[in-house]
Amino acid sequence: MKLNAVTSSLHGVSLAPLVEADREALRTAASDPALFRYWPRDMAADKWDQNFDWMLQEQADARWLFHTGKARDGRIVGQTCYLAIRPEHKGVEIGGTWYVADVHGTQVNPTCKLVLLENAFACGAERVELKTDARNSRSRAAILKLGASFEGVFRRHLLLPDGQWRDTAWFSILRDEWPKVRADLEARLAR
């Protein structure tokens, strides 16, 4: 399994690999600290350049593949990515996802996830994982609405920047589940 970066436009939502030219637009989109309440990285505004440089390096080293999401109006509204890429086990995680508040509940997230899931399975993935802080009920509901199966909670999985421990809720979609998940997502987006 070798994952490809994705460039796509679907249902008025664009997805493209992260590039240096996205730094300022993504900084603007990331200006609301509430977006990162449950994140395991300190995403404070004064650390934006450091975090953006880290993202570019992770991408250059093929550990993560970051993608920016653009809304119908052309503005960058957040990001999602491939991480925990395990070609030897034909597995990958889709995560690192955040979007500005005004696109929550719109077609942005399900469209981006449809594109990344389609690409992952086309590239040979047998398992795609999604995970979130167990306390993040909005994210958990969105993952379930995508069609992923809840697998359980890893207790004290990650140490957060504020010193608290994160319990992580894990979800997955397997290759044999993908056709139904895809059909349901496409029907949802067509409404």
Image (cartoon, grey):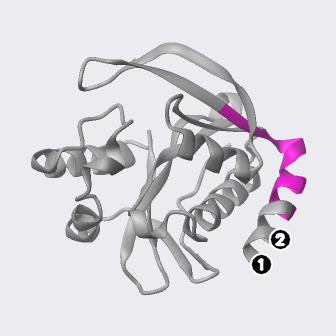
Q: Which residue is mark 1?
A: 191
> Image height check: is 72 above or below 25?
below
- Spatial CA distance of label 2 from label 1 is 7 Å
Question: At 25% from the left edge and 17% from the top edge, which residue is drawn?
Answer: 163
Would residue 148 be found to the left or right of residue 131 on screen? right
Q: Residues within 10 Å of mark 2 (few under 14, many from 20)?
A: few
Contact (Cβ within 8 Å) of mark 2 with mark 1: yes
Q: What amino acid is found at the position of numbered circle 1 in the picture?
A: Arg
Residue 59, compared with residue 10, is above or below; it is above
Left or right relative to 157: residue 159 = left
* Image quarter of the C terminus: bottom right
Foreground label between 2 and 1: 1
Q: Quarter of the image holding residue 110?
A: bottom right
Chain part drawn in magenta? 171-183
Q: At which x and y percent is residue 183? A: 86, 63
Kindly tell me whether residue 60 is visible in this rendering: no
Q: Main secondary structure of the magenta part?
A: helix
Q: Quadrant of the N terminus?
A: top right
Disc 2: which residue = 187
Total numbered badges shown on the rendered structure: 2
The residue lying furthest to the left in this view is 46
Q: Quadrant of residue 111?
A: bottom right
Residue 72 in view: yes
**Residue ranking furthest to the top:** 156
180 within the magenta span = yes
Could you tell me residue 112's position as x and y percent? 58, 64
* Drawn side of residue 122 relative to residue 33, left or right: right
Residue furthest bottom as drawn: 73
Tell me the kind of residue under disc 2.
Answer: Ala
For label 2, the SS is helix
Residue for point 55% across, 46% down:
138
